[in-house]
Image: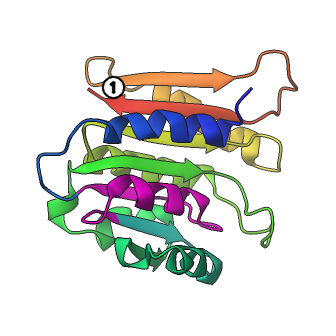
Amino acid sequence: MLKITQLAHLLVRTCFAEPSSGSPLFAIDATVGNGYDTLFLAECVGENGMVFGFDIQDMTVAHAQLAKRGLAKRITLFQAGHETMLSHLTHSTEASVSAIMFNLGYLPSGDKALVTTRQTTLAALSQSLVLLRHGGILSIACYPGHPGGEEETNAVLVWAKALPHEEYGVLHHHLLNRQRTSPELVVVQKI
């Protein structure tokens, strides 16, 4: 069985499968952490594309990993919360981002006191809908097993369920035969 992060990559890759119109591809890693999703997205957008990354923590590890692979020119990192996405990006990125990835909770190798919260995540998700292009995918990996994680996961599920079905397709992946606190994946596609 795939981990939810692997499943997210598999699904997100599909929005890059169709040929682009020649204009550069954009993607956002809303929670950079160690940069695994940033690296994945940098490979997906190609040479002319750009990945915008957001995190409140230091992203030196992520930047070094991308530089080592020769992908640093494809990324712009902002040491800022994901709820500030719109204020950091230009109007030219509105409705033109192919993929936006969230990996909620805390960075396992980082300060566990620094976690995403229901309030900032909901604000960031609303901004994501403004940025996402038609056919674009928003993936949200939720981790209900830490303090505050269940509240945040439930808020994401309520938010996603309320999206108008005429405009968005929503997938919720959760292993039924696991603990109630096992990771969950929500994927939203703008149609």
Return the residue at label 1.
Answer: 168
Residue 42: in magenta span: yes
Return the residue nearer the eye: 146 or 98. Answer: 98
**SS at mark 1?**
strand
Residue occupying the point 28% across, 62% down: 49
Asked if residue 153 lies left or right of residue 186, the reply is right
Asked if residue 81 lies left or right of residue 52, the reply is right
Query: Could you classify mark 1 by the number of other residues whose Cα lies within 10 Å: few (under 14), some (14-19), or many (20 or more)?
Result: some
Q: Say what amino acid the circle numbered 1 marks.
A: Tyr
Residue 133 locus on image (x, y percent): 23, 42
Residue 48: in magenta span: yes
Q: For the N terminus, which image quadrant?
A: top right
Residue 39 vs 5, above or below: the answer is below
Residue occupying the point 79% across, 68% down: 113
Q: For the C terminus, which image quadrant?
A: top left
Residue 56 locus on image (x, y percent): 58, 74
Residue 62 vs 164, above or below: the answer is below
Residue 13 vs 119, above or below: the answer is above
Residue occupying the point 75% across, 21% down: 175
Residue 43 locus on image (x, y percent): 43, 58
Q: Is residue 24 visible?
A: yes
Indicate the quadrant where residue 190 lies.
Answer: top left
- Chain part drawn in magenta: 25-50
Return the residue nearer the eye: 76 or 6. Answer: 6
